[in-house]
Image (cartoon, coloured by chain):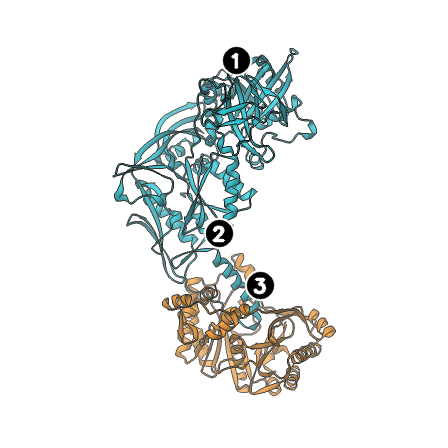
């Protein structure tokens, strides 16, 4: 798989949730009085038009509806945006259109509608397979409900991802192994398995700081990570990225596009873009607060609050940060072109001697051991 | 010129916080030397640092005009002396310039070790001493007990001690009367060849080097050709003046007078405290007794935290040295810390003052290596070398023996802390010489190796006595010791900045503490890192820093890149501050913390 520089991925951010999950630091908001979906959808469409106008003639290879909770969007709105994208850009014949879905029964009722609108892949946030954990994580669904929703999704969509969070409070290696085995028997070729991270400014961060939330420590967390790698590999899912496992061919094309540092246009409140205009790569971010974003778009046609042109070395760093996460690694030639200097061979050799990276020709990738220490490895390479 | 019969020269001896500077301020005010509106607290302590720490580094004088109750006019010269053990020699020279002292003791605290040492110096200089009990207005004041203590501990008659409160001014006029009536006037021969004691000198940005002197015999005049007897260097006097404390120029100074002169002297280092100033053409037959060139006794490396600021550090050192000839520095390089300087100091406080001044006045952050003393290394070849830096120790096979400096320490402590102090001294290889009591306070005299004292002894002393112990020392000479160099190895690479010379019996424990500390301070690496302490090839302590197990961001998609890139920038910034030892990176904070270690 390669991606052309003209290929574009589109990210749509739907910032609303029924309730805020205590671990989540994404741009999500709860609106008890309801959301005027139509106005937000139309504003997103305006931003899409803005991007299309900046650099016409690009080809869209993937679309991703993320959030927040995009499965709260009425299917007609999703369809409206997919149609708009198709009218603004050329689409790749095998275009991937993913929607993140929460597995509640009400949201599952919309699955057929999303499929009809053009969504061909769902990423289902099951998160845990025990009731206690789901409560701690603040989820709105039970175990059986989630499994029923996932099974329904599998019937409706050609492709799906079964997503879990592990290294949760009180989780042991044995309990996680059993839970993961059960999930592996359900999944249909793709799993995103995230280790729970305490993010700043979340409810979990406060509880953690107050000593009221204990999560598995360094040693235990490492053991859980290892067992994750083991069991998924045995089930035929390759660890194609740090937290993503897929049967060959079932990888998320949209996410791979990020990791390969391709261009993407992010629309909606608090969305980020990496978008080349002329010869310059722009780092664009939009207003996070939904209503303020809406005002901006209505007034100016986009919600952009920051637009920074990335220097070559900055792009090289970003490419390294993203590219080393995937098993295929990075192209050293591309790094050198962006950075204006090659990646230090001594540093590569030192890391290779420690069994953390492997170089073959102009490709450099992290080994399984190196991926576990990726932040340190990247820090060393980028220094 | 004033008739010596109407001159009184005195200094004030007091422990830190017992009220020396406040009393000086009151005396100055009562004599009207400074208008009330110009009065700032602690007039004589001019440097910010001195004010903050309540210590005096440079000697300072003030000339006061006082009309006594009998109607006679007197000139009172107050010499404010450096009040710390590190500056004991400077204290002795300031005292030598006076005929008497006020011994100020806090009526609630009592006599402290440092007071004791200075009062003995004053007695050795034949001073008439007036005991003054300060802070008698405090509820905790016990003037009778302290009076008794002065008699018991110092052996001075305290029956006519003056009770005052420098803060409120109570009793201060009595002090002025006592100075006039109880202290003797200076004696001197105006017609004899000039003989003046060089009390101190400093660099003034407008006047150049300013020399503070006390004239003993003869006259010091504007335009006169003078000579410094220790170096035979000759100069022509440009200005003569007195300090009120505002500088006031005069034509000459006669016997008993205290003042300053300038003479186109290039640097403070050309003038030595304790030297004798005489007339070039008609010199005195012999110099005043007691001259001793300043000798640094404690050495440490100073390195800029930011290697790029080495030149700024060099500049700061040069400027400080301009005013402080007792401090020395030579360039040094360290694999751990880069380019820096090996510096010599009169003691630990001196070191601390210089370090703070560099950071405060020149804004250069410095890393200080573990203080070391001067060892005398006797080589098998018969030669003796002086060792200022553990790194320079010759190969053990070439060494016959190593000698280390010893001190005699005097410690005063309330008896409930005596046990802990005894243990501390014994742990530090001390030899008890004396243990006496004065009331509920014990006075301990111990002989201790100086290298045990420069290693956090003050801090321990203060902490085991909750701040109640006071301490003073004097050098007593060199003694052979079973000394070894303790090397610290990180991932088998020796870290020069952490090498130290220690007594063999203490090596293992010191090594273990250092290894444990470093294990906490060095961040985990992608591989295991052994941390060892060794004497020669023999490992005496070892810790293992285990490898980093997992360090990876679980979730990273398009929206996070900017934040992640900024984190990476921070990581790169942090790496720049690391020092590389083979494959191991050690943050500078680790060195700073390791060098600051205590033994707990």
Do tags 2 and 1 sit on the same chain? yes
**Any mark on residue A202, and which?**
3
Tell me if B98 is positioned left or right of A53 in this view: left
Relative image position of residue B314 (x, y in whole percent): 50, 45
Report the Cα–Cα distance between label 3 and label 2: 39 Å
Quarter the N terminus of chain B occupies: top right
Q: What residue sits right under mark 2 in the picture?
A: B307
Q: Is residue B460 visible?
A: yes
Report the Cα–Cα distance between label 3 and label 1: 85 Å
| Labels 2 and 1: the sequence-earlier one | 1
Q: Secondary structure at mark 2?
A: helix
> What chain does mark 1 sit on?
B
Relative image position of residue B506 (x, y in whole percent): 33, 41
How crowded pointer 1 is (Cα within 10 Å; few <14, some 14-19, many 20+) is rated as some
Q: Residue at x 49, y 72 (%)?
A: A336
Report the Cα–Cα distance between label 2 and label 1: 58 Å
Q: Nearer the viewer, mark 3 or mark 2?
A: 2
Relative image position of residue B311 (x, y in whole percent): 51, 48
Q: Secondary structure at mark 1?
A: loop
How crowded pointer 2 is (Cα within 10 Å; few <14, some 14-19, many 20+) is rated as some
What tint does the image give chain A?
Answer: orange
Q: Secondary structure at mark 3?
A: loop
Q: Nearer the viewer, mark 3 or mark 1?
A: 1
Q: Check if mark 2's residue and mark 1's residue have beta carbons within 8 Å.
A: no
**Any mark on residue B189, and which?**
1
Relative image position of residue B25 (x, y in whole percent): 62, 26
What tint does the image give chain B?
Answer: cyan
Image height of B553 relative to B375, above or below: below
Do tags 3 and 1 sit on the same chain? no
**Camera-side residue of B410 and A280:** A280
């Amino acid at each position: 798989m390669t991606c052309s520089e003209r290929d574009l991925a589109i990210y749509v951010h739907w910032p609303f949730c029924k309730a805020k999950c205590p671990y989540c630091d994404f741009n999500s908001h709860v609106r008890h009085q309801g959301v005027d979906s139509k106005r937000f959808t139309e504003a997103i469409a305006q931003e899409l038009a803005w991007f299309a106008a900046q650099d016409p003639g690009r080809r869209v290879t993937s679309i991703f509806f993320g959030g927040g909770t995009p499965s709260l969007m009425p299917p007609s709105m999703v369809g409206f945006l997919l149609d708009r994208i198709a009218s603004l850009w050329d689409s790749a014949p095998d275009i991937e259109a993913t929607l993140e879905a929460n597995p509640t029964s009400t949201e599952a009722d919309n699955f057929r509608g999303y499929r009809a609108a053009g969504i061909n892949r769902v990423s289902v946030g099951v998160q845990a397979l025990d009731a206690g954990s789901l409560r701690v994580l603040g989820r709105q669904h039970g175990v059986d409900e989630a499994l029923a929703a996932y099974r329904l999704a599998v019937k409706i969509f050609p492709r799906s991802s079964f997503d879990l969070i592990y290294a949760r409070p009180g989780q042991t290696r044995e309990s996680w192994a059993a839970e993961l085995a059960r999930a592996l028997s359900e999944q249909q070729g793709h799993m995103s398995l995230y280790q729970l991270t305490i993010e700043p400014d979340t409810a979990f961060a406060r509880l953690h700081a107050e000593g009221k939330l204990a999560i598995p420590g360094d040693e235990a967390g490492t053991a859980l990570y290892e067992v994750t790698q083991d069991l998924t590999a045995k089930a035929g899912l390759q660890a194609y990225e740090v937290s993503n496992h897929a049967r060959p061919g079932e990888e998320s094309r949209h996410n791979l596009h990020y990791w390969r540092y391709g261009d993407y246009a992010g629309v909606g409140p608090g969305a980020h873009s990496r978008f080349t205009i002329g010869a310059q790569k722009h780092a664009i971010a939009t207003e996070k607060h939904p209503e303020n974003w809406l005002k901006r778009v209505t007034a100016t046609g986009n919600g952009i609050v920051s637009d920074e042109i990335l220097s070559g070395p900055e792009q090289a760093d970003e490419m390294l940060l993203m590219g080393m996460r995937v098993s295929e690694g990075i192209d050293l030639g591309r790094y050198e072109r962006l950075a204006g200097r090659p990646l230090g061979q001594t540093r590569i050799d030192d890391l290779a001697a420690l069994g953390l990276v492997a170089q073959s020709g102009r490709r450099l990738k992290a080994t399984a051991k190196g991926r576990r220490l990726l932040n340190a490895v990247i820090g060393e390479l980028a220094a | 010129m004033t008739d010596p019969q109407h001159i009184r020269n005195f200094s004030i001896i007091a422990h830190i916080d017992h009220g020396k500077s406040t009393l000086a301020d009151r005396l100055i005010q009562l004599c009207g030397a400074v208008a009330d509106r110009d009065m700032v607290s602690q007039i004589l302590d001019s440097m910010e640092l001195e004010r903050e720490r309540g210590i005096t580094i440079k000697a300072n004088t003030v000339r006061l005009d006082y009309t006594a109750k009998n109607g006679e006019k007197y000139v009172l010269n107050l010499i404010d002396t450096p009040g710390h053990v590190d500056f004991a020699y400077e204290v002795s020279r300031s005292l030598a310039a006076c005929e008497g002292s006020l011994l100020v003791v806090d009526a609630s605290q009592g006599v402290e070790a440092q007071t004791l040492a200075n009062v003995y110096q004053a007695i050795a200089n034949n001073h008439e001493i007036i005991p003054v009990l300060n802070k008698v207005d405090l509820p905790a004041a016990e003037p009778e007990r302290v009076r008794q203590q002065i008699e018991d501990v110092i052996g001075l008659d305290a029956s006519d001690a003056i009770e005052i409160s420098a803060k409120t001014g109570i009793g201060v006029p009595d002090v002025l009367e006592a100075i006039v009536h109880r202290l003797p006037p200076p004696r001197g021969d105006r017609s004899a060849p000039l003989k003046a004691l060089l009390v101190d000198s400093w660099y003034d940005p407008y006047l150049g080097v300013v020399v503070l002197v006390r004239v003993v015999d003869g006259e010091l005049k504007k335009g006169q050709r003078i000579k410094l007897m220790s170096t035979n260097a000759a100069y022509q006097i440009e200005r003569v003046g007195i300090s009120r404390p505002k500088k006031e120029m005069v034509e000459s100074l006669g016997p008993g007078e205290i003042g300053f002169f300038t003479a186109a002297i290039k640097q403070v280092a050309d003038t030595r405290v304790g030297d004798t100033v005489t007339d070039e053409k008609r010199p005195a037959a012999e110099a005043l007794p007691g001259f001793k060139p300043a000798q640094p006794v404690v050495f440490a490396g100073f390195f800029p935290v930011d290697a790029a600021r080495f030149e700024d550090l060099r500049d700061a050192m040069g400027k400080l040295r301009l005013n402080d000839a007792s401090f020395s520095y030579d360039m040094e390089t360290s694999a751990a810390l880069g380019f820096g300087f090996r510096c010599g100091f009169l003691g630990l406080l001196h070191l601390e003052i210089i370090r703070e001044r560099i950071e405060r006045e020149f804004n250069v952050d410095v890393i200080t290596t573990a203080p070391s003393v001067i060892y005398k290394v006797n080589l098998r070849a018969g030669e003796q070398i002086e060792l200022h830096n553990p790194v320079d120790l010759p190969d053990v096979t070439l060494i016959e023996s190593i000698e280390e400096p010893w001190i005699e320490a005097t410690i005063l402590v309330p008896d409930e802390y005596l046990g802990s102090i005894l243990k501390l001294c014994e742990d530090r290889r001390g030899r008890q010489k004396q243990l006496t009591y004065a009331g509920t306070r014990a006075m301990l005299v111990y002989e201790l190796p100086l290298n045990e004292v420069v290693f956090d002894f003050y801090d321990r002393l203060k902490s085991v006595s909750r701040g109640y112990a006071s301490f003073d020392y004097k050098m007593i000479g060199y003694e052979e010791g079973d000394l070894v160099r303790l090397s610290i190895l990180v991932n088998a690479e020796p870290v020069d900045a952490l090498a130290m010379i220690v007594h063999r019996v203490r090596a293992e424990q010191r090594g273990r503490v250092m290894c444990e500390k470093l294990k906490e301070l060095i961040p985990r690496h992608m591989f295991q890192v052994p941390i060892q302490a060794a004497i020669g090839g023999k490992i005496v302590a070892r810790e293992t820093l285990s490898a980093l197990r997992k360090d990876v961001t679980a979730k990273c998609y398009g929206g996070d890149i900017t934040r992640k890139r900024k984190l990476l920038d921070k990581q790169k910034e942090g790496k720049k501050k690391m020092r590389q030892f083979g494959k191991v990176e050690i943050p500078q904070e680790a060195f700073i913390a390791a060098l600051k270690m205590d033994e707990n």
